[in-house]
Image: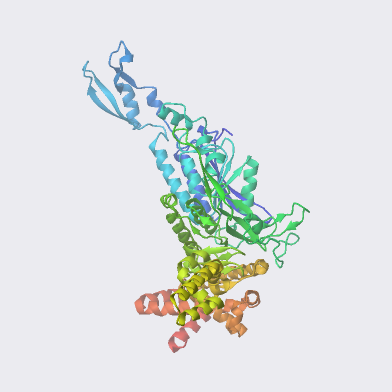
Amino acid sequence: AGKNDVGMVAWLLTLKTPQFQEGRQVVLIANDITFKAGSFGTREDVVFLLASRLARKKKIPRVYIAANAGARIGLSESIKKKFKVAWQDESDPALGYRYLYLTDEDYAELSKKEAVNCKHLPDERTGENRWRIMEIIGEEIDLGVENLKGSGTIAGETSIAYQEIFTLTLVAGRSVGIGAYLVRLGQRTIQNVSSAPILLTGYQALNTLMGREVYASNDQLGGGHSVMHPNGVTHLLAETHMDAIKATITWLSYVPSFAGSHLPIHDITGVDTVERSIGFRPTKGVPYDPRQLLCGYTNKFDDSWVSGFFDKNSYFETLSGWAETVICGRARLGGIPTGVIITENRTKEKKYPADPADLTSQEKIIQQAGCVWFPDSANKTAQAIRDFNGEGLPLIIFANWRGFSGGQRDMFDEVLKFGAYIVDALVAFKQPVIVYIPPFSELRGGAWVVIDSTINSDVMEMYAADDSRGGVLEANGAASIKFREKDILEAAHRLDPLLQSLDLKLKNPLSIAEEEDIRAEVKQREKRLMGVYQQLATHFADLHDTPGRMAAAGAIKKVVPWENARSFFHWRLRRKLAEFDLIKQIQNVSKSNQDRRQAVANLKKWFVESEKDEKKWEEDKIVLDWMERDAEKIKHFMSQVEFERVYNDTQSMLRDSPEAVIRGLVKVINNFDAPTKRALLSKLTSGTQ
């Protein structure tokens, strides 16, 4: 410490973990806060830039430990020691100055180094020619704007890195200016709870700007507990540096060793089993903690374990302090790492803190209903989807949304924009996405639209539990529009024997008094039946929203009972991951001459040729068994695809430029051994294929 001549350090680490026992590489970048307070100068920017580019080249995770003072501020020390001052009054400097200048000797020395721009002008009072300082370039490095240029470079690099590889930032100390932007541009953030604010401007500078003591500490501006965790910049809080390191290792355990490689499958033997029922089951109409559905819980009465959907002790939550009506994290299903998003069904509170700089502001606490997307929770959902996509994880969404909050405040707060972000994030997703409506959950209106499987049908599939619901409106809302009082009365007169009898009487000749009595009796009967027929209308509307109808309409792929959901989705996910891998191989050998659907069609054709039964294509275990059993056959099929691609490309090139193809062929033939050359020439002369 203290011996570096640049305030940035980088390592290429090899981490040996349970998931990667042979080791995995990680690029680690860190500010050296012992060198010029960890500020960013041009040399620090170059170290950061080259280390980040190395991570992208190797497609490995990039972890950044942030503790800095922002872009470096410098002044030319060599000129500071030599400049002279032309005072308004040489006998009283307090009256002010007119300009700064250099002596002939100092100017001659500094101008050789191009450290200063001066003009040789006569003094207005004495007439003496002096070298007036017009611009200070400086002979030292990292004095000003060049540091900002370097900061812009690494900001752009970090944005690109987030798109291409896994990026994570540990905020171990204060992070200012460009340091704060690097935190956000890298997206995934673990922040120490003490002495590690994320800042644009320090509190002392703001107090000076406002002319009064407004803020008492930097934590009020960028502390983890008060600002950055609640607003979603920080994903996780850590009490100590060791806690931050542990969280980093845990997070990395879900991520492939390099971008595009296989997921780190965890052996769950002795911890959990795939083929088991799910112990936790929601109760209709009773709010519950969605985390219990995901990862189970310990029964407080007898300490027994009540299992959830995912593997025991595998759930790792992030962004828990922000937008609490949506929950997101990572978990394992039969050892397979997955991203997970689930709806919070309970009402939560959102707090808007009072700003000390605004004397009229007050803390506000707003109630946010469960099962509704608000601006912040829609934004959180989109952010989580983007994070999972960058981590190469498949995604399971447990959907239980009645819609978006569309009141004036939420529309002003851009709920529509953030809802659209969810669609954008899903369109860009590259791994399998499973949307599942759990028991006694519902998916309605715009909430269905933004996660419908047709948004990205190449990767998305939708399923529902047998006691879930889905539709444009909730049943009572649909009934109030499509089964109104007129329709209710019509149904009552069609179904109720007493009303039918009274209607028949009214068709007979009656006196005015008799007719009035019967009509009064009809009104009384209608009034008596109205309540139960309104319930009947709601139930009738509800029958249009059942999972069976969703499947019949093609809105979902299949109804999956909750009891079988863990086993079903484990095998479905394994099959889709294996299928995606083979599709990628097919596209590689075809040099992208086949789009994804063509590649899937090819794979299915090979399967049917082998199994002789197209219906088995929907059986995940059978398809997985075929992929493993007939791996050599599949390789042979792929070689045929490659041969066909080369054959067609050669014909195309011959049509475009026969001379170029012939010259290239002659050059290649000259490198062959004699027997191969004779065989090829024989084929060319005979015209055989």
Q: Position of residue 55 (x, y in %)?
A: 53, 52
Q: How many marks?
A: 0
In percent of the image, x 54 and y 49: which residue is there? Answer: 188
Q: In which quarter of the image is residue 685?
A: bottom left
Q: Can residue 596 be seen in this view?
A: no
Closer to the camera, 639 or 379?
379
As drawn, 366 above or below 525: above
As drawn, 559 above or below 345: below
In percent of the image, x 42 and y 42: which residue is there? Answer: 150
Closer to the camera, 547 or 637?
547
Q: Position of residue 87 (x, y in %)?
A: 29, 17
As drawn, 446 above or below 488: above
Closer to the camera, 285 or 94?
285
Q: Quadrant of the N terminus?
A: top right
- The answer to whether residue 372 is left or right of residue 313 is left
- The answer to whether residue 286 is left or right of residue 220 is right
In percent of the image, x 59 and y 44: which residue is there? Answer: 237
Q: Where is residue 476 in the image (x, y as percent from the top left)?
A: 52, 64
Q: Where is residue 537 in the image (x, y as percent from the top left)?
A: 53, 70
